Image (cartoon, rainbow, N blue to C red):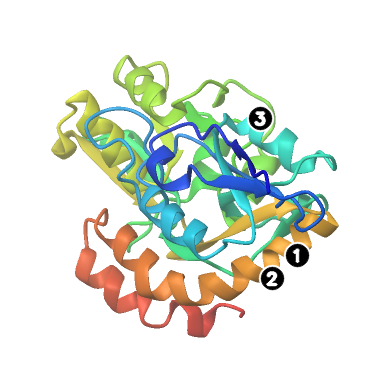
């Protein structure tokens, strides 16, 4: 009996783990579906370049999740945000993104998993030398009143275009008129680029995750003691992320498997992978003991 093997091209640092074979025996077996995993350069979850390539928390998770889903062939694809969103919304593409925040708008076209990991909430990063400009907008507990800051039009704030920052911040940004005080960045490696722009005083603040800013600052040789991070007033301490898949029959079938496996992997593996990137690792691990008690599912 003849056996024909089709090998998938797997791009990126996970090739060693995700290069799986498809064996087809005419009349006796059906070809497996190919699930495309959409990864964006999103340190410290996924790292595409530099000495820590492939060592992000999601980079390390993917081989383990893939190994638990042998009913599929798996293809890793590196995409930017716009391309990833386009592919998830294409009914003819079978794909999943492991690093999505839930929003009501996204749920119209994307199927979301159970919560898979918790990231410290987004906040505002500034250069410490600019502290005085932000002091009037700080609460007693060190949180920044972002709505009042933006309304004051006293500083320019950089954000990543089409990124969700969670319900609290997204609502504030939607309510902010299109003015010069809010600068959208559409390029790749947006946070790293915005850090450089902030250093040149193109704007004075960045909305982002602190672990993400820390990673880019260290890569660029920016001393961390020259930066300051403020949590946002009324925003939660942590935000839960999900795996998002095509909202199709194929996506629903895969999501049943993903949810089953992530109920195990999110606590036994992913929490530990992500904690290694935390400034306050012990606090994160302590808080993590209740993450999925409080989250749905």
| Image position of 60 (left or right of 168) | left
Could you say which disc has been placed on residue 82 in the image? 3
- Where is residue 132 drawn, in percent x and y? 28, 36
Residue 201 vertical placement versus 270 (above, below): above
Pointer 2 residue: 256
Query: Residue 114's image quarter?
Result: bottom right
Residue plotted at (20% across, 33% down)? 218
Is residue 154 visible to us here? no
Q: Earlier in the sequence, mark 2 or mark 3?
A: 3
SS assignment at label 2: helix
Could you say which disc has been placed on residue 253 in the image? 1
Q: Are marks 1 and 2 in contact (CB under 8 Å)?
A: yes
SS assignment at label 1: helix
Q: CA distance from mark 3 to mark 1?
A: 25 Å
- Where is residue 47 drawn, in percent x and y? 36, 37
Residue plotted at (36% across, 82% down)? 289
Q: Are marks 2 and 3 in contact (CB under 8 Å)?
A: no
Tally of numbered discs: 3
Q: Are marks 3 and 1 in contact (CB under 8 Å)?
A: no
| Image position of 279 (left or right of 48) | left
């Amino acid at each position: 009996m003849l056996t024909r093997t089709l090998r998938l091209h797997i791009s990126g640092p996970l090739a060693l783990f995700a290069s799986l074979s498809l064996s087809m025996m005419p009349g006796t077996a059906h070809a497996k579906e190919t699930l495309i995993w959409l990864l964006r350069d999103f340190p410290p979850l996924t790292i595409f370049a530099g000495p820590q390539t492939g060592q992000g928390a999601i980079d390390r998770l993917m081989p383990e999740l893939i190994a638990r889903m042998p009913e599929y062939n798996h293809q890793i694809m590196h995409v930017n945000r716009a391309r990833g969103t386009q592919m998830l919304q294409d009914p003819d593409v079978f794909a999943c993104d492991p690093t999505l925040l839930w929003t009501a708008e996204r749920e119209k076209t994307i199927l979301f998993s159970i919560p898979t990991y918790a990231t410290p909430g987004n906040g505002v990063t500034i250069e410490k030398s600019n502290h005085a400009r932000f002091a009037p907008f700080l609460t007693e507990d060190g949180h920044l009143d972002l709505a009042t800051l933006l309304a004051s039009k006293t500083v320019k704030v950089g954000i990543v275009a089409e990124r969700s920052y969670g319900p609290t911040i997204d609502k504030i940004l939607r309510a902010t008129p299109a003015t010069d005080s809010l600068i959208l960045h559409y390029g790749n490696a947006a946070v790293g680029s915005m850090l450089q722009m902030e250093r040149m005083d193109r704007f004075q603040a960045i909305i982002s995750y602190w672990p993400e800013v820390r990673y880019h600052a260290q890569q660029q040789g920016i001393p961390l003691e020259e930066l300051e991070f403020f949590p946002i007033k009324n925003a939660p301490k942590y935000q839960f992320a999900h795996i998002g898949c095509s909202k199709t029959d194929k996506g629903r079938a895969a999501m049943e498997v993903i949810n089953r496996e992530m109920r195990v992997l999110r606590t036994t593996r992913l929490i530990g992978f992500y904690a290694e990137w935390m400034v306050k690792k012990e606090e994160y691990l302590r808080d993590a003991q209740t993450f999925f008690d409080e989250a749905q599912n």
